[in-house]
Amino acid sequence: MTASDHAIVTTAQMSAIDAHAAERGVATLTLMENAGHAVADEILKRFSRRPVAVLCGPGNNGGDGYVVARILRGEGWPVELHQYGDRAALKGDAASVAKRWSAGVSGMDNVFAKKPELIVDALFGAGLARKLDDQIASIIARVNEAAIPVVAIDVPSGVHGDTGKPIDGISFRAALTVTFFRKKLAHVIYPGRALCGEIVVAQIGIPPDAMERLWPGREPALSENTPPRLAAPAPDAHKYQRGYAMVVSGAPAATGAARLAAAAALRSGAGLVSVASPRESVAINAAHLTAVMVKPFDGVSGFMRLIEDKRINAIVIGPGLGATPLTREMVAATLASKAAAVLDADALTSFAGDAAGLKSMLRPDCVLTPHVGEFERLFPGLLESAPDRASAALEAARRMGCVIVLKGADSVIARPDGHARINTNAPPWLATAGAGDVLAGIIGGLAAQGMKVADAAAAGVFIHGEAAKASGWGMTADDLPALIPPVLRKVMG
């Protein structure tokens, strides 16, 4: 398996890949036939025979639709094919497959005449970059309102393939989307990901090494986050060789966040985890912790002495710390140490409006883990001005010179060198108080074991999602740390 196997491609890259396949002797008509067969096969796997309306556009996406219609009709399905625009204007492969359709062709004004119970959306695909006309917009609205199942070819019509956003706020809501060769951003990032429904990536004859041939030696700019490769510790390793992570605690009323992070760091495989605790919080932390040690300190100077311990490999700072000038000083002390640093929550909010001040202290072995609100406070307007979340996270990583984890249902792990991974395994119940503290702890625990911070961040986000999936509805952040070891066992084989 190569790095490109989980690549996320742009529409322009996909066009280049199609052209490359043709140059290597794969007929474009064969690709279209294979694409239509792949879509039809997925429909036949999931749906019982029913009246279906196949909506075909003026380009190659419409050509795929003609193939789907032909196959379903051959399987005995009642198929109505509706052509957007003039069928006689079809060109190339789309015109060729249209000639093989021997039944009638209707326009778009009577899509609902035969009361279809399934819609095949072969209108536009990922290449659409213009507003939908009123007729198509009206059909989409009616289909969505009636909750007629939609199978989209490539992406639901109306969704921009490179941003995942409906171009004019209008698109089909598909039950199933079948795309080809590799996913596009619309398949992995919201709202596109939700609008696509179930996503199937079909291989239709494009040479598997097409990306390596087209862009030799180049890592894909975007890829889907995948299970990490974790090595088991050496059989004779002692606890310090397995990594020492420290988590910084806040005041007595806000200590739980640090304990969640510390438990997650320990469960993630670090050999030793300590909670650096203000003197007034020692009793409450000590009362709740057993395998995690409590290290008292007094003020910033006391904290600085505490982290002089050269055995500390990673420090997690921010959960429950408070957005105060004192937090800024402690962040500065953390970043002056030699340990890898995970900055979360209040460690970020304390620098609201002063990203430059934070940047001046950051090192490449730092990870910032903002949710949307914290991201907006650090980088005002960036999310709104960027074409998509991935672009915003990549720009933030470039500005700060370190790894950014923009948290959410589609967390983006962005590196300053222009590469990002999009996470797709987070269940909705992971949106619960304290879950972000656990994630910071997992990343810190992995970094403490010697993983590069970009890899620790990507692995941490994936493990976090898998642990939550193992729980189900009703999960709380307290449940998550104990769910980490089974995930680790799985990814270690």
Image: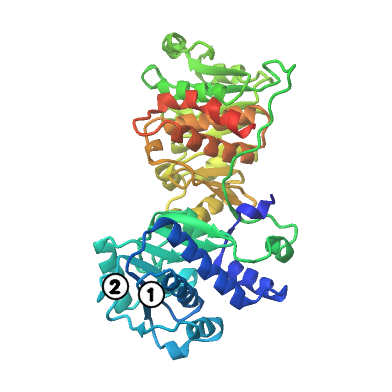
Coordinates of residue 233 in the picture (x, y in percent): 70, 24
Q: Name the residue type under label 1.
A: Leu
Q: How crowded is mark 2: few (under 14 residues within 10 Å), some or many (20 or more)?
A: some
Determine if residue 330 is in view.
Answer: no
Q: Earlier in the sequence, mark 1 or mark 2?
A: 1
Question: Is residue 102 or residue 177 the one in the foreground?
Answer: 102
Q: Which residue is drawn at 68% across and 19% down?
A: 311
- Compared to residue 161, the image places residue 443 above or below, namely above
The label number, if any, that marks residue 55 in the structure image: 1
The label number, if any, that marks residue 139 in the structure image: 2
Coordinates of residue 86 in the picture (x, y in percent): 40, 88
Q: In the rendered view, does 221 fall on the left or right side of 484?
A: right
Determine if residue 479 is in view.
Answer: yes
Q: In the rendered view, does 151 fall on the left or right side of 245?
A: left
- Compared to residue 184, the image places residue 76 above or below, namely below
Question: Is residue 115 or residue 406 the one in the foreground?
Answer: 115
Choose top left, top right, bottom left or bottom right for residue 16: bottom right
Coordinates of residue 306 in the picture (x, y in percent): 60, 17
Q: How crowded is mark 1: few (under 14 residues within 10 Å), some or many (20 or more)?
A: many
Coordinates of residue 263 in the picture (x, y in percent): 50, 21
Q: In the rendered view, does 111 fall on the left or right side of 213?
A: left
Q: CB atoms at circles 1 and 2 under 8 Å apart? A: yes
Mark 1 vs mark 2: give the one in front.
1
Q: Distance between the residues labelled 1 and 2?
A: 10 Å
Secondary element under disc 1, as helix, strand or loop, is strand
Q: Residue at x 62, y 38 (%)?
A: 228
Q: Which colour scheme is used?
A: rainbow
- Compared to residue 410, the image places residue 305 above or below, namely above
Secondary element under disc 2, as helix, strand or loop, is helix
Q: Name the residue type under label 2.
A: Ile
- Compared to residue 311, the image places residue 209 above or below, namely below
